Image (spheres, rainbow, N blue to C red):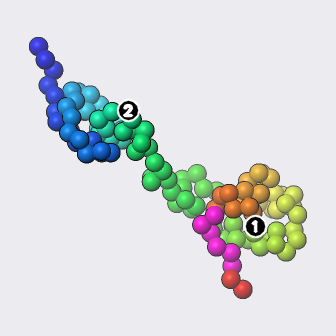
Amino acid sequence: MTRPTTVLTCSCCGTKFERELRREAYRVKHKKAGPYCTRSCASKNHNHSNHVRGIESVHSILTENDVRKIRMQFKHGVPVKNIMILTGMSENCIRSILYRKTWKHVEDYVA
């Protein structure tokens, strides 16, 4: 007895392929990406398009204004150690902001 299948179109390359219905139902139920015809298509299509930046991230602690203030304080000679105390952020976090490894989309105040 064969299991029921469904015909799907790959999200990456557009080819049509068959998959067991229960397997596809599992993918949909658990909100997995796809459908993909092969693992290589799944790995090719694993991009960061759903990555949100800045305040839109649920993990964000700072706001864009906080980032601007940090950069402005450093520009005016406030040491990183003092900025750490004022903000409660780690040295690595502050330096990542200052050297634009993080929050690179935030422009400085225009004076």
Which label was assigned to residue 39? Answer: 2
> What number is the disc on residue 16?
none
* Neighbour tally class for label 2: few under 14, some 14-19, many 20 plus, Cα within 10 Å: few
The three-letter amino acid code for the residue at tag 1 is: Ile
Amino acid residing under circle 2: Arg
Report the residue at 82% width, 68% height from top: 74
Residue 87 on the magenta span: no
- On screen, residue 43 versus residue 97, left or right, reads left
Q: Residue 40 in the image: x percent, y percent?
A: 39, 35
Q: Residue 29, percent across and down? A: 30, 36
The residue that appears at 75% across and 69% down in the rendered structure is 71
As helix, strand or loop, the secondary structure at mark 2 comes to: helix
Q: Secondary structure at mark 1?
A: helix
Instruction: State the residue at coordinates (43%, 38%).
Output: 43
Which secondary structure type mostly characterizes the magenta part of the structure?
loop
Tell which of 43 and 100 is nearer to you: 43
Q: Looking at the rendering, which quadrant does residue 41 occupy?
A: top left
Instruction: Return the residue found at the far bottom.
Output: 111
Dividing the picture into quadrants, the one containing residue 107 is: bottom right
In the rendered image of this protein, does residue 81 appear above or below residue 44?
below
- Distance, label 2 to label 1, CA atoms, is 44 Å
The magenta span reads: 104-109
* The furthest residue to the left: 1
Of the 4 image quadrants, the one containing the N terminus is top left
Q: What residue does disc 1 label?
A: 70
